[in-house]
Amino acid sequence: MVRHYLDFERPLLELEREIEDLKRFSKGKQLHLNEQLKNLEDKYRRLQKEIFSNLTRWQITQMARHIDRPKASHYIQWMFENFVELHGDRVYGDDPAIVGGLSKLNGRSVILVAHQRGVDAKEMAQRNAGMPHPEGYRKALRLMRMGETFRKPVVTMIDTPGAFPGVGAEERGQAEAIARNLKMMILLRTPILAIVIGEGGSGGALAIGVGDRILMLEYSIYSVISPEGCAAILWKDGRKKEVAAESLKLTAADLFRLGVIDEVVKEPLGGAHRDPQGMAVSLKQVVERHLRELESKDIEELLALRYEKFRRMGAFVEDGSG
């Protein structure tokens, strides 16, 4: 059983408790409860499929933020080998909200850059809940340039509510740091693969999200603003977050349909937190496939395709009224 349940998952919690109680009661006893247990497990699977095949966009937002959801540190541990973390932006300091360094994926050398939210309250406070300061983005760019220098592909993992909006961050050039990353990633002469593993919020996500391929896990989100922020601006009422989530079209399925991302990576039924290591195995296979395809292309072709990819995003309509 997982540790935390969202409101719409409560019916599953009750069934899980029944199943666990029945297993515990029958353990070591000569009781023939196999049929009863099988019926409960079948009922559980049917209910799980019913719930997760009809999620609203707000419910998917809750899934993307689930406290048990695997973080970047989990995927780095389970997918990559010999990770060597590098620190600092060589200007101001180190930002623990961004982790990055050298690693290998089945023997292929890569540069890793990721948001890290923290796995518990203490680490979340230390890492500012994955909301980077300017030095975090400058560190990320330093590492990506290292990938260009040594001709190693860059893999980024996106999971942030957004860049930190505090006074200190603004004084140290938050907007400039994000804008510089956008410019330099478009021009970076090495393959870039970006993966949204949880919440992709605003420019804080996009600052490490310019890639030749952009992937999203099935229950992740990617948006210019949070549903709560959108509701507060448009309706002056944060309680309309569910309406805002529907309007924002922020899910992986929405963004794939709109041509913003390249692939939706299927999650285990119930979300990545139900089988984190199984999710890592699936994601690793997808990442390897995309890296093989990207590395087979000439760098000039890759840069041209990257440029066109982002130029195509968005739709414009002229009414001819002058």
Image (cartoon, rainbow, N blue to C red):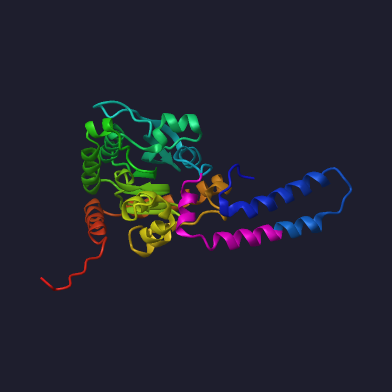
| Whole-percent x, y for residue 12 in the image | 64, 53
Q: Main secondary structure of the magenta part?
A: helix
Name the residue located 53 percent from the left edge and 42 percent from the top edge.
Answer: 68
In this view of the protein, which residue sits in the foreground, 271 or 3?
A: 3
Q: Which quadrant, please, contains the C terminus?
A: bottom left
Examine the rendering and report whether any part of residue 121 can be seen: yes
Q: Position of residue 164 (x, y in %)?
A: 32, 37
Q: Quadrant of residue 248?
A: bottom left
Image location of residue 193, percent across then percent down? 35, 49
Left or right of 52: which side holds 318?
A: left
- Residue 289 seen in the current view: no
98 vs 17: above or below: above
- Which residue shows up at 34% across the image and 63% down it? 258
The image quadrant of residue 129 is: top left
Relative placement, left or right, of 306 versus 64 is: left
Estimate the x, y position of residue 27 in percent, counting from the top left. 82, 44
Q: Nearer the viewer, residue 67 or 296?
A: 67
- Residue depicted at 51% across the width and 60% down the height: 55
* Residues in magenta, as a range: 42-66
Image position of 289 (left or right of 31): left
196 sits left or right of 15 in the view: left
Relative vertical location of residue 85 with respect to residue 265 in this rendering, above or below: above
